[in-house]
Amino acid sequence: MTTRGIYFFSNDLRLHDNTLLAQAAGEVDELICLYIDDTLFPSARYRPEPLSTKRNLFKEASLAALESQLANLGQMLWRYQASSLKQVYALISHLEINLAYVSKQVGWFEQQVFHQIATNAPQLNWQVGNNHTLWSEAELPFKLSELPGSFTGFRKKVESLATKAPLIKPSSLPRPMHFQSDKFSLSRQNQVSLGNESFNGGEQAGLTHLAQYFDSNAPSYYKTVRNELDGWESSTKFSPWLANGCLSAKQILTELNTFERHHGANESTYWIYFELLWREYFQWYGHRHQQQLFTFTGIKKQSPLTSFYPERFAKWCQGQTPYPLVNACMKQLNQTGYMSNRGRQIVASCLVNELQIDWRYGARYFEQQLIDYDVASNWGNWQYLAGVGADPRGQRHFDLTKQTQLFDPQGKFIEKWQGQCDLALDSVDAADWPC
């Protein structure tokens, strides 16, 4: 009897270190590889549409690269772009598929998609794996319900845990299934694009950057430059490939450990691991708190003293506030799809504290713009800064004058990104009456 499987690519757009794909390769005779586009997920009140050009290009390039790699192994990547899952259920029934593989989803909306498929295709036996974290849930030294309420508590429990070595890419895959694609509204049209000038989407681009970074001496001085607002070498720049699953956290950690063995460990190399742990914490934070990741009161169930001012929000998005450093950061984001970690903290603090706007609007705007958007890291960090998340200190308020003095004392960043703006913050009041 022929065993047939379906692999749902999602946050794991790669062949290397893909334990779930390796499992599928060993269990099924025939396989269909399917990617369900983000446009399928339910839109939310605070989500701007559509995704930015930069973010979309990086995703498209990553999918095109994955399709090419699968083709080298005799497989195909299919995409489903409709707003209903009915034809996916029909495809599963038509092909008599009995095994389904999917990486564990952090996002609550993404989870609902696969819950719908499972409900409407009850014949499927699901295999859910951890393709986006350093450890599986079973490897954590605590139950998920007992996840520490702060990063420090989490770090102390997991910092010394061993990690499994990343897998090499499979040498072969099960043969593809053939069917009439237009009958089920499936497509293989992937836009081939390099993304943007610095970040090229796809697994091979990610592996190339990973090798180049650890072939340099940059890891040895990372901590001294990590707060710079601009510049390719000011941070590791792994996040776009991590967020799209073109690289795994285990691959990065393995290269970091190799670098330390050959060149020595110091505070900077440790800090790279430290930040991988921050990412890991937010992944499990998302799994633990589910829908609370998106609620105004966060996990602390307390309402920030903010509201929504459409004019202020629009000016924040466009980089037209009274705060030049904030403007420069937002214009950098809008033009490149990327912003430094320090910049993200600065603009988020401004939105919540100076502009007094509901933090969720900022989180949604980042979701639209960032090429390295990661549901757990993005929403977890915004909650943290707004005082409704994992920060035991409560709301974080950055002094914008001090931040400018520290990180752009000569005004070069502000000048480069044209952060100066003469517009008043408000031209109307809260009731939209002219000021």
Image: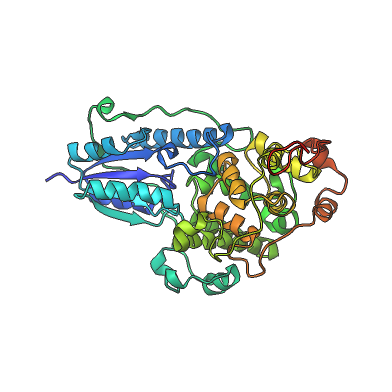
Can you say whether 135 is above or below 176 in the image?
A: below
Q: Position of residue 332 (x, y in %)?
A: 70, 38
Indicate left or right for 196 with 26 as reference: right
Residue 35 in view here: yes
Can you say whether 173 is above or below 270 in the image?
A: above
User: How are the residues colored?
Assistant: rainbow
Q: How many marks?
A: 0
Can you say whether 227 is above or below 208 in the image?
A: below
Task: Give whichever of 276, 409 is nearer the camera.
Answer: 409
Q: Residue at x 34, y 39 (%)?
A: 34
Residue 262 in view here: no
Residue 290, picture quadrant: bottom left
Q: Residue at x 75, y 36 (%)?
A: 434
Indicate left or right for 115 with 395 as reference: left
Q: Position of residue 69 (x, y in %)?
A: 40, 36
Q: Position of residue 247 (x, y in %)?
A: 50, 48
Task: Give whichever of 59, 429 is nearer the camera.
Answer: 429
Work out which residue is located at the far right of the displayed protein and give it.
410
Q: Position of residue 297 (x, y in %)?
A: 56, 60
Task: Give whichever of 61, 416 is nearer the camera.
Answer: 416
Q: Residue at x 68, y 48 (%)?
A: 340
Q: Dividing the image into 4 quarters, which one contains the C terminus? A: top right
Task: Give whichever of 177, 415 is nearer the camera.
Answer: 415
Q: Residue at x 36, y 29 (%)?
A: 188
